[in-house]
Image (tube, helix red, strand yellow):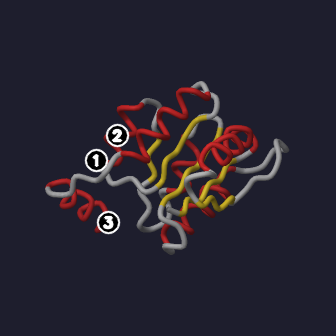
């Protein structure tokens, strides 16, 4: 599985830790940023989302301070369903019911250990399809 990951300055350290954590099991494509110097999150949310939309990768992970801004930016790209998850249950449901293809995380909202649990739950969950597929198709029409 190939995963794109991107973050702004607030999410940089978490991005780097996630990359290291996942690198033995997944191919990771780093879309930036490359330091803690102040940058604008839309650029990195868009780069990850575009990689997902273009099917260059199988999934994406985006990180900013709260996770809110970067998830909004990622969701502007057609075909992307970025879900901001602050709990394991959010992560499971975002995949099971919404087939989220981008996980958004808030570096300042959860501890590293919580983020890893959220990440694992998201990666291990599967889309249930059925009535949920009908709902996703209705979203795509909008």
| Residue 26 as seen in the image, left or right of residue 36 | left
Could you say where residue 76 lies in the image, as x and y percent from the top left?
50, 61
Which residue is under mark 2?
A: 92
Q: Label 3: how many residues lie within 10 Å, few (<14), some (14-19) or many (20+)?
A: few
Front residue of this view, candidates 24 and 138: 24
Q: In which quarter of the view is residue 138 placed? A: bottom left
Question: What SS does tag 2 mark?
Answer: helix
Please tell me whether residue 142 is drawn above or below residue 86 in the rendered image. Answer: below
Q: Which mark is residue 33?
A: none
Q: Label 1: how many residues lie within 10 Å, few (<14), some (14-19) or many (20+)?
A: some
- Which numbered disc, 1 or 3, marks the residue closer to the eye? 1
Q: Label 2: how many residues lie within 10 Å, few (<14), some (14-19) or many (20+)?
A: many
Which residue is under mark 3?
A: 140
Could you say where residue 30 lies in the image, as x and y percent from the top left?
69, 58
Quote the CA–CA distance across marks 3 and 2.
Answer: 21 Å
Quote the CA–CA distance across marks 2 and 1.
Answer: 6 Å
Could you say where residue 103 lies in the image, as x and y percent from the top left?
49, 48
Which residue is under mark 1?
A: 96
- CB atoms of marks 1 and 3 within 8 Å: no
- CB atoms of marks 2 and 1 within 8 Å: yes
| Residue 67 as seen in the image, left or right of residue 101 | right
* Number of marks drawn: 3
Sequence-wise, the earlier of marks 3 and 2 is 2
Sequence-wise, the earlier of marks 1 and 3 is 1
- CB atoms of marks 3 and 2 within 8 Å: no
Please tell me whether residue 92 is drawn above or below residue 3 in the rendered image. Answer: above
Residue drawn at the location 55% of the way across and 39% of the way down: 105
Front residue of this view, candidates 140 and 35: 35
Please tell me whether residue 59 is drawn above or below residue 103 in the rendered image. Answer: below
């Amino acid at each position: 599985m190939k995963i794109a990951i991107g973050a702004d300055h607030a999410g940089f350290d978490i991005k780097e830790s996630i990359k290291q954590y996942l690198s033995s099991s997944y191919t990771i494509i780093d879309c930036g940023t490359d330091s803690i110097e102040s940058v604008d999150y839309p650029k990195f949310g868009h780069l990850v989302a575009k990689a997902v939309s273009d099917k260059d990768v199988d999934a994406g992970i985006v990180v900013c301070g709260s996770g809110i801004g970067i998830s909004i930016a990622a969701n502007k790209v057609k075909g992307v369903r970025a879900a901001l998850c602050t709990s394991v249950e959010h992560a499971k449901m975002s995949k099971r019911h919404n087939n989220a293809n981008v996980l958004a995380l808030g570096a300042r909202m959860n501890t590293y250990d919580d983020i890893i649990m959220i990440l694992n739950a998201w990666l291990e969950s599967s889309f249930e399809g059925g009535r949920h597929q009908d709902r996703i198709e209705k979203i795509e029409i909008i």
